[in-house]
Image (cartoon, helix red, strand yellow):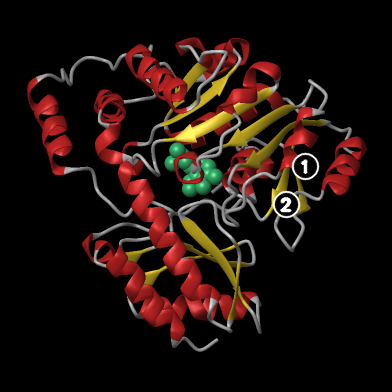
Amino acid sequence: MNLSFIREDLLNLSAYTPTPIDESQKKLIRLDANENPFNLPEELKTKLALFYENKIETNRYPDGSHLCLKNLIAEYINESTSLDDVIDNDNISVGNGSDELIRSLLMATCLNKEGSILVANPTFSMYRILGESLGIPVINIDRNESDFSWNIDKANETIAATTKPPVRVVFVVHPNSPTANCLTTTEIQWLKDWPRDILVVIDEAYYEFSQKTLVGELAQHPNWIILRTFSKAFRLAAHRVGYAIAHRDIINILEKIRLPYNLPTLTQLAAQFVLENRHLILPAVGDIMKEKERVYNVLKGLEQFKVWHSDGNFIYLRSANNPSTQNHNNILDQLKEKGILIRHTGGGLRISIGTATENDILLQAIRIINN
Ligand SMILES: Cc1ncc(COP(=O)(O)O)c(C=O)c1O
């Protein structure tokens, strides 16, 4: 068909195509999306279902202010980080997953050919995908192979050399996906020394697992913004809720850009429930991290893999003898035949931590894989 009314750059872009999830998919051991292996506690699901039945007016629009949810998020942040400068609800914006916030940030900074973004690979692919879908130049540099830290000299050179349009946003991830490393003190110092005309997006999607955050630094660095999500430790991937923490002036801009009713009523309620009941939900993070240590130690002992330290609920590894795309795909396929899904990304394999039983099955299978 004649698509001459469509932006030319979009015509050549390949779509992000998620795998359809049917009942057979649910029987597989799904270690490919860094989700929490545990569903919500039964009592919370029942409470949510009762709310839907008795309280929610499906004919009414959701609360577009998100005020109740923002207050709870602020309380959670202030409680988990003893801050001198308290986070308030006007330091928070809520999105339909952090994906929506990433897109809003890109729209606010780089559209109209005003800016480029800088990412260090391997990293979370949505920065690039969303950037490209908006026609924003994405500047890619490689990370240091040994520990996947930023190649700071290369980044500085690249920023200085990129003028048309200049770098407006840099995405760092703490800890990074897929490589699971947190920012080092050298990298953090580097970000602190930055000019204020570049926005630093610090993605802390896995904060509850790493227990490392830069939220305490926000007041000194008004060009920083932190992204978090309810999709991981809080077990709400199905509901799509993420939030941004930043100076109120940046938050105001995000609020201008978002759709007025971006979060359905049930989703807002679900996020409120998990925050109010975090004492029931978050203790499992400790169990997942213990499992992570166990899986890491077994994988580390296998000669056929090179395995990296992890600060998240997932482990990154590569074949020691043959780290080619073909061989990694082959490993992926062999595991798939045994009903186990993992992710091939960034030149390696990323394995999410599942339940103890799922991890046992994974470890048994991976030991005997042809590699
Ligand atoms: C680093 C990182 N940021 C953001 C996300 C997406 O979060 P959300 O589900 O809130 O869109 C992910 C999901 O895997 C991630 O790995």
Q: Cβ of disc 2 within 8 Å of ligand 1? A: no
Q: Is residue 191 visible?
A: yes
Q: What residue type is labelled 2?
A: Ser
Q: Residue at x 8, y 27 (%)?
A: 53
- From the viewer's side, name the closer residue of 197 and 289: 289
Residue 3 horizontal/vertical position (percent): 58, 43
Residue, x 83% and y 44% (percent of image)? 155
State the quadrant of the C terminus: bottom right
Label 2 residue SS = loop
> Which residue was labeled with disc 1?
186
Q: Residues within 10 Å of mark 2 (few under 14, many from 20)?
A: many
Q: Is residue 28 above or below residue 370?
A: above
Element at badge 1?
helix
- Badge 2 is on which residue? 149
Task: Please determine whether, in this image, residue 24 is positioned above or below residue 15.
Answer: below
Question: Which residue is found at the position 66% from the left and 77% from the top?
Answer: 324
